[in-house]
Image: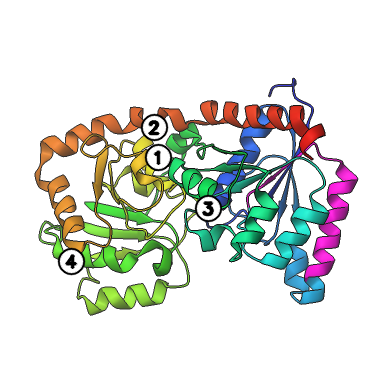
């Protein structure tokens, strides 16, 4: 570990469990820790599934004991005291900031030191309050980062943000490769994979099932593996029965290490209505597994070059998605090309590169804090 940095960094995250932003927060703690920073993580919810580095202060445990309005006020007071006690140099806020009153209090009265606000989702309602004027007031001159270029351009214009830049999610590809070698007892043969949260409003798994049914994969005895958990798991299982494809769709639930399943899949699928920067795409490609993704906002088109390392298809179009699935099964030259190009196409998202981006932002905050905070 480098000893050249002595700054104290506080990463604020929703949790360290079951989500892309949460997984990104955990990895960020490891990146900054490896650079020699004194890293603390404050989580709003209590779940912890991902490995992290540094010291964890789990506010979610207080929420579990007293989930009321006054309990929230108490947690804000505890949070403020924690920041003051530890005298952090920089806060990195990875939460979604959608509750107007809470965000006004946090931004105005609690964050009294240099802060980076990270935007993880292209959907405005998942990233900001519903009041455009308040978002502009709170964040116009704050340091903000986006995990995709499309999101940066959108919010820069929408809320007149003056200090916003792109830092992609970083990936520890060496660890992913190592974890992918773990032996699993329930491996299945010949399958494609979706892995992530089972939330149809976001991930549009109805489209995935409909396209799979329309494809020729079932006739080729290629199954669909769905790896994950979420609020719509029962309705998605029921819909697979309604489509009469349930014998070909395998639901395995959430696992903190999906990579052995990914590595042995023919390809990965993403059908989201919207994203920020879908982590499953670089992860899969790093394991030499091509990806078929809908061209949603935002992220897929910044990683996938159509016909080079995967396929991009029109969103909400089940037939186009089914045709893409068929092409990866029957056009062996196309599939082999995408597979052979997959790993090298995501090298720029490695922790070695992304760590430098974060170090530059932290140094910039340090240089400008006297005039901007």
N-term mark: 1 or 2: 1
Q: Earlier in the sequence, mark 1 or mark 3?
A: 3
Q: Residues within 10 Å of mark 1 (few under 14, many from 20)?
A: many
SS under mark 2: helix
Mark yes or no: residue 188 visible: no
For label 3, the residue is: 158
Mark 4 and mark 3 lie on one chain; the one further toward the N terminus is: 3
Quadrant housing residue 35: top right
Marks 3/2: CA–CA distance? 30 Å
Residue 329 numbered mark, or none:
none
Observer-side mark, 4 or 2, equals 2
The residue pinned by badge 4 equals 213
* Label 4: few (<14), some (14–19) or many (≥20) C-alpha neighbours in 10 Å: many
The residue closer to the viewer here, 47 or 70, is: 70
Name the residue at 65% across, 28% down: 359
Q: Decide: marks 1, 4 in contact (CB < 8 A)?
A: no
The residue carrying mark 2 is 346
In the image, taking residue 363 as reference, residue 118 lies left or right, namely: left
Q: Secondary structure at mark 4?
A: helix
Dots 1 and 2: beta carbons under 8 Å? Answer: yes
> Residue 83: within the magenta?
yes
Kindly report the distance in space between the C-alpha atoms of the residues bearing marks 1 and 3.
Answer: 28 Å
First reached walking from the N terminus: tag 1 or tag 4: 4
The kind of secondary structure element at disc 1 is: helix
Q: Which mark is residue 282?
A: 1
Quarter assignment of residue 149: top left
């Amino acid at each position: 570990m480098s000893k050249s940095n002595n700054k104290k960094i506080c990463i604020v995250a929703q949790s360290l469990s079951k989500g892309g932003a949460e997984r990104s927060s955990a990895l960020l703690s490891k990146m900054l820790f490896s650079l020699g920073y004194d890293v603390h993580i404050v989580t709003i919810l209590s779940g912890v599934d991902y490995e992290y580095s540094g010291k964890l202060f789990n506010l979610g445990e207080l929420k579990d004991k007293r989930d009321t309005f006054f309990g929230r006020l108490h947690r804000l007071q505890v949070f403020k005291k924690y920041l003051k006690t530890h005298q952090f140099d920089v806060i990195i806020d990875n939460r979604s900031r959608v509750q107007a009153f809470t965000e006004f209090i946090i931004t105005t009265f609690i964050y009294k030191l240099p802060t980076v606000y990270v935007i993880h989702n292209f959907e405005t309602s998942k990233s900001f309050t519903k009041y455009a004027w308040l978002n502009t007031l709170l964040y116009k001159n704050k340091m903000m980062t986006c995990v995709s270029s499309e999101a940066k351009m959108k919010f820069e214009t929408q809320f007149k943000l003056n200090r916003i830049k792109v830092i992609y999610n970083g990936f520890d590809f060496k660890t992913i490769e190592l974890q992918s070698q773990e032996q699993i007892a329930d491996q299945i043969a010949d399958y494609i994979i979706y892995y992530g949260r089972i939330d149809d409003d976001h991930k549009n798994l109805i489209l995935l099932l409909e396209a799979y049914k329309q494809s020729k994969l079932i006739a080729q005895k290629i199954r669909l593996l769905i790896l994950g958990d979420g609020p719509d798991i029962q309705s998605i299982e029921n819909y697979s029965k309604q489509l009469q494809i349930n014998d070909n769709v395998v639901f395995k639930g959430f696992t903190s290490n999906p990579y052995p399943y990914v590595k042995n899949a023919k390809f990965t699928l993403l059908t989201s209505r919207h994203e920020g920067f879908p982590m499953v795409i670089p992860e899969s490609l790093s394991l030499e597994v091509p990806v078929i993704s809908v061209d949603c906002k935002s992220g897929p088109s910044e990683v996938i070059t159509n016909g080079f390392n995967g396929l991009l298809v029109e969103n909400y179009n089940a037939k186009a998605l089914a045709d893409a699935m068929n092409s990866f099964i029957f056009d062996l030259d196309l599939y082999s090309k995408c597979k052979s190009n997959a790993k090298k196409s995501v090298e720029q998202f490695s922790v070695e590169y992304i760590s430098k981006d974060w170090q530059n932002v932290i140094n910039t905050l340090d240089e400008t804090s006297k005039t901007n905070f």
